[in-house]
């Protein structure tokens, strides 16, 4: 199963220690295990661009979408056996100690599937029931 691993800062965590937090060692390990699909650092939030369309108008502004002290510093795509393996790999990333790691499984979309049927199926996958649409 593929996971998106968001690597975020955490202003309240321990400080970065270059001698102990070697990202190259982590990358070498996940590459050797064959679970690292792709990953990259992201430019600081000051370089973010927010794109929206409201009432048909394109709105482009500088800066991040959310205002928080934490920000996404990078990401990796992992292809693991299961969540346990993804957690084990994420726990070894240097940013797990002085930042935050968030794992999210990919949720493939079938563009040919009926959107209502897809919503029902996905709600069922999450153990939720959907209410019928008005007029149906």
Image (tube, rainbow, N blue to C red):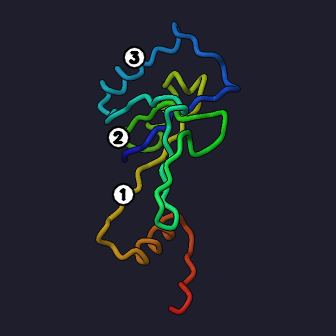
| Residue at image location 32% in from the left, 28% down from the top | 33
Badge 1 or badge 3: first in the primary sequence = 3
Pointer 2 residue: 79
From where the camera sits, is residue 129 visible?
A: yes
Disc assigned to residue 24: 3
* 69 with respect to 40 (left or right): right
- The single residue placed furthest to the front in the displayed view is 57
x, y percent for residue 54: 52, 63
From this view, report whether residue 53 is shown above or below residue 48: below
Total marks in image: 3
Determine whether label 3 and label 2 are within 8 Å by CB.
Answer: no
Q: How crowded is mark 1: few (under 14 residues within 10 Å), some or many (20 or more)?
A: few
Q: Can residue 89 be seen in this view?
A: no
Identity of the residue drawn at 41% across and 51% down:
106
Helix or strand or loop: what does disc 2 sit on? Answer: strand
Q: Is mark 3 on a helix, strand or loop?
A: helix
- Residue 15 vs residue 50, the one in the foreground: 50
- Camera-near label (1 vs 2) is 1
User: How far is mark 1 from mark 3, CA to CA?
Assistant: 30 Å
- Within 10 angstroms of label 2, few (less than 14), some, or many (20 or more) residues? many
Q: How far apart are marks 3 and 2 (CA)?
A: 19 Å
Residue in view at x 44 percent, y 37 percent: 85
Asked if residue 133 lies left or right of residue 27, the reply is: right
Which of the pair 72/95 is nearer the observer?
Answer: 72
Q: Is residue 77 above or below residue 128?
A: above
Residue 108: numbered disc: 1
Q: Residue reaching furthest bottom?
A: 135
Tell me the CA gap for discs 1 and 2: 14 Å
């Amino acid at each position: 199963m593929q996971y998106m691993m968001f690597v975020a800062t955490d202003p309240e965590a321990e400080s970065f220690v270059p001698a102990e937090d070697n990202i190259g060692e982590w990358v070498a390990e996940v590459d050797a295990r064959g679970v690292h699909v792709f990953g990259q650092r992201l430019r600081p939030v000051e370089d973010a661009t927010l794109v929206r369309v409201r009432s048909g108008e394109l709105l482009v502004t500088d800066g991040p979408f959310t205002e928080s002290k934490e920000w996404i510093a990078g990401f990796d795509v992992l292809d693991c056996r299961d969540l346990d393996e993804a957690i084990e790999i994420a726990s070894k990333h240097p940013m797990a100690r002085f930042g935050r790691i968030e794992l999210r499984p990919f949720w493939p979309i079938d563009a040919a599937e009926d959107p209502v049927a897809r919503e029902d199926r996905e709600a069922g996958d999450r153990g939720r029931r959907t209410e019928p649409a008005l007029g149906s």
